[in-house]
Image (cartoon, grey):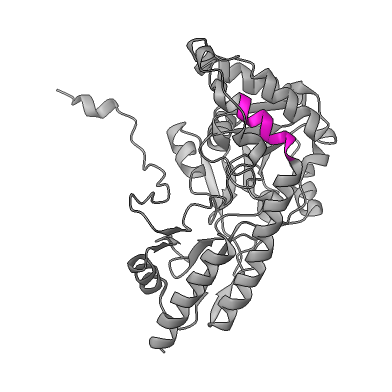
Amino acid sequence: MNSWKDNIRKVVPYVPGEQPKVDDIIKLNTNENPYGPSDKVRSIRLDLDNLRKYPDPKSSLLVDKLAEYHKLKPEQVFVGVGSDDVISMCFLTFFNSDKPVFFPDITYSFYDVWADVYRIPYEKKPLDENFNIVKEDYKKENGGIIFPNPNAPTGKLVGLDFIEDIVKANPSSVVIIDEAYIDFGGETALPLIDKYENLLVVRTFSKSRSMAGLRIGYAMGNAELIKYLNDVKYSVNSYTMNTPSLVLGSAIIDDEDYFRESVGKIINTREKFTAELERLGFTVLPSKANFVFVSHKTVPATEIFEKMRENKIFFRHFNAPRIDNFLRITIGTDEEMERVIKVLETFCSATK
């Protein structure tokens, strides 16, 4: 007899960053924003009695607010439970060809998980020796394309001309640009969605909007792409967005001054931290994200990783080919990064 296990869908799951259950730590391993919500958002009172009702399946409050903010029509905006949910819906909706989907070999490690779960063929396109995306690799026959800009975990950015060249070369495929980190120094591909009907741009509230706990993500594209996404969403779960997320998410969009202020702080801290790391003998890839990707010239990444944990400082280490001697370090507050530098300075000088 066949075992019941023979019919189970088996995949290697995505491994999220560690969420330590200890106090008094500096948590720089999951790219969260060190600055919480503004006073405007904190002052909002939720109608708890209203939670007995289902939320609006169309998420109109948030969709309309995002459309207004980005100067789009509401039918050009799709929202979901974090950008992970949005991109998962994109894989399920748009990547249905026998041809492989293309994405980089060093990138957000959820992409191949979704492809495996949905049984979508895919090819990982190698970054070059400097960790750059090779544009020509994405001009071959494919069933879809996705990559982050800036890329993760490298933090490296490509320009708008680079993206347009890829989109233009693939009129038969949906091209998805994952802009989770775009607010930290990049140029968005959003202006291209009116020019190319096969382009989708995905964003999240988890990074620059300081709201990873709310789980809000969204996609922007032409109305036909968005309709197809909603058709799949309503076929899976009509009520994906909860009422508090819709209310608080809409309020966050109105707080532009605070948003710009907190993003500016992170960018300034990133540049100062990068200079200090280089002084200590680190190689730091040029980053336009809220993190840096680094390796030390003499001290192995695993040793640094463990030493920092001993000091209650958490980095992210990926035990993967080509990047196993790198660490990804989220940018925290100035005070947190100064503490990091002090610990690194002591450890790195002691191991020379």
Image side of residue 285 versus residue 190, left or right: left
Q: Position of residue 85 (x, y in %)?
A: 53, 32
Figure quadrant of residue 210: top right
Q: Is residue 208 above or below residue 271?
A: above
Q: Position of residue 212 (x, y in %)?
A: 53, 41
Q: Do we see residue 55 in this rendering?
A: yes
At x 55% / y 66%, what residue is drawn? 335
Q: Position of residue 91 (x, y in %)?
A: 56, 32
Image side of residue 176 versus residue 109, left or right: right
Q: Residue furthest top?
A: 53
The reply to whether the magenta stretch includes residue 254 is yes
How many numbered dots are placed on residues in this image?
A: 0
Q: Do we see residue 98 in this rendering?
A: no
Q: Position of residue 330 (x, y in %)?
A: 53, 59
Image side of residue 152 versus residue 228, left or right: left
> Considering the image in quadrants, where does the C terminus appear?
bottom left
The reply to whether the magenta stretch includes residue 160 is no
In front here: 50 or 237?
50
Q: Residue furthest bottom?
A: 352
> Considering the image in quadrants, where does the N terminus appear?
top left
Figure quadrant of residue 333: bottom right
In front here: 38 or 351?
38
In front here: 99 or 33?
33
Q: Is residue 87 above or below residue 347?
A: above
User: Which secondary structure is most common in the magenta stretch?
Assistant: helix
At x 39% / y 87%, what residue is drawn? 350
Q: Is residue 275 above or below residue 200?
A: below
Residues drawn in magenta:
247-255
Image side of residue 352 versus residue 247, left or right: left
At x 60% / y 47%, what residue is drawn? 207
Q: Residue furthest left?
A: 1
